[in-house]
Amino acid sequence: MRRLRLDRRSFLRGAGATLALPLLEAMTPSAGAAEDTGPVRLLWIFVPNGKHMPDWTPREEGTDFPLPFLLEPLAPFREHLSVFSGLGLEAGRAHGDGPGDHARAAATFLTGAHPVKTAGANLRAGVSVDQVAARVLGRATPFPSLEVGCEAGRAAGRCDSGYSCAYVSTISWRTPTTPQPKAVVPRAVFERLFSGRTLSPAARRRGARRRRSILDLVREDARSLAARLGRHDRRKLEEYLTAVREVEARIERAEGRPAVEVPETVPPGVPSDFGEHVDLMQDLLVLAFRCDLTRVATFMVANAGSNRTYRQVGVREGHHTVSHHGGKPEKIAKLRAINRFHTEKLARLVRLLAEAREGEASLLDRSLVLYGSGLSDGQRHDHHELPVLLLGRGAGVAAGVHRRFPRGTPLCNLYLALLQRAGVAARRFGDSTEPLPLGERG
């Protein structure tokens, strides 16, 4: 019997819906044999207000370092974990512009460029590293890049000591003067990925009663394909379709509940529970990577200077408020709880990537996930000794190590190294001086 061969860009199609497929054996060169290598995925994750650094920074360097309190949730994935200490963003400092460290922390996080202090239309920062990668890696995917977040923001107006709100709510910049807006409504991201269009809130409300699952729309195509696949691929296709439907169903449930947290900044369709919102965005990112819809993404967990409360962990004061703890033990305890919550959510994302198989490897093996903040100590607004992690072993990067670099080493040195390892021919990026050594996976 002749083996079915599928193109890597195959889709399930239906009325108004296009559903990409995960990597199947039918897409590989020989039956039952998946390629040992695959495309690398790059994801940058930003969290605001820095970290409580004594609970973040490992005491020892090398490969056998004990995990500090804030990194403990990542213990199951320590062979994929690299911790970088000593990196900084010189462009985040004032340089004569006065206050506004939170806006600069976000604006410089992926650009390494000092932003023009303005609340008007004359924005200027720099092209962000994700967009540099997208110009090359994005040629092979339907979406060159994907930008998501969990807090809405304004594209104009004054938000931080004379800085535009665009700086506060954006980490991705397509050009030095054009911030790349992020999507915060899960339904909008789902529709963009799987139907190729995004409805207006009014149109979405009108169609809610007659909406069918995307799987209903592609069901016949899915049945036809499954009948021609081998047993392993049929099981993988079924698992994938189940995952898509579970995310879709959770989005629908979220849309049926009113948003109660920070209502003035939460658009319709956003879950009232922040943890659920983070989970949905993570699920969508993993689906996008799994189907090779994009290989470059950014996730802004919350806006710079966010004062969101975290009642999930018993913190009723705002995050920014407790980051200015003044050494008070009760405030430090609350900050530690928020920081730990963020790491636990990161661990969930890493687990999803580890569980997603792509041939003989996991998606985590083919990803590089950078997680960090543009501030280190939130109370002092430091832009050096930043909290920076790299997860995954994509592009053959070595992992499972804590590396300490001289204070002031540009974070952009790491970005330059990531670009080069991902196949982007870059000689410099931002204020880089040389690519950081990333080692080779054994």
Image: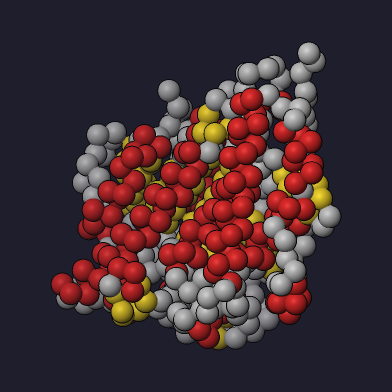
User: Residue at the spot x=67%, y=66% of the render?
Assistant: 188
User: Residue at the spot x=52%, y=55% of the render?
Assistant: 282
Residue 277: percent from the left, percent from the top?
Answer: 50, 65
Which quarter of the rendering shows the C terminus? Answer: top left
* Residue 142 appears in the picture as rendered: no
Residue 266: percent from the left, percent from the top?
Answer: 54, 78
The vertical placement of 142 against 258, above or below, is: above
Q: Nearer the viewer, residue 391 or 435?
A: 391
The vertical placement of 427 against 106, above or below, is: above
User: Residue at the spot x=61%, y=42% of the render?
Assistant: 240
The part of the image, by quadrant, that contains residue 37 is top right
Which quarter of the rendering shows the N terminus? Answer: top right
Q: Residue furthest top?
A: 1
The vertical placement of 394 against 180, above or below, is: above
Residue 347: percent from the left, percent from the top?
Answer: 39, 49
Residue 227: percent from the left, percent from the top?
Answer: 75, 30
User: Residue at the spot x=68%, y=24% of the render?
Assistant: 230
Q: Residue furthest right?
A: 15
* Residue 368 appears in the picture as rendered: yes
The vertical placement of 352 against 438, above or below, is: below
Q: Is residue 193 left or right of residue 55?
A: right
Figure label count: 0
Colour mode of the rendering: secondary structure
Q: Is residue 402 left or right of residue 356?
A: left
Q: Residue furthest left?
A: 329
Q: Nearer the viewer, residue 207 or 304?
A: 207
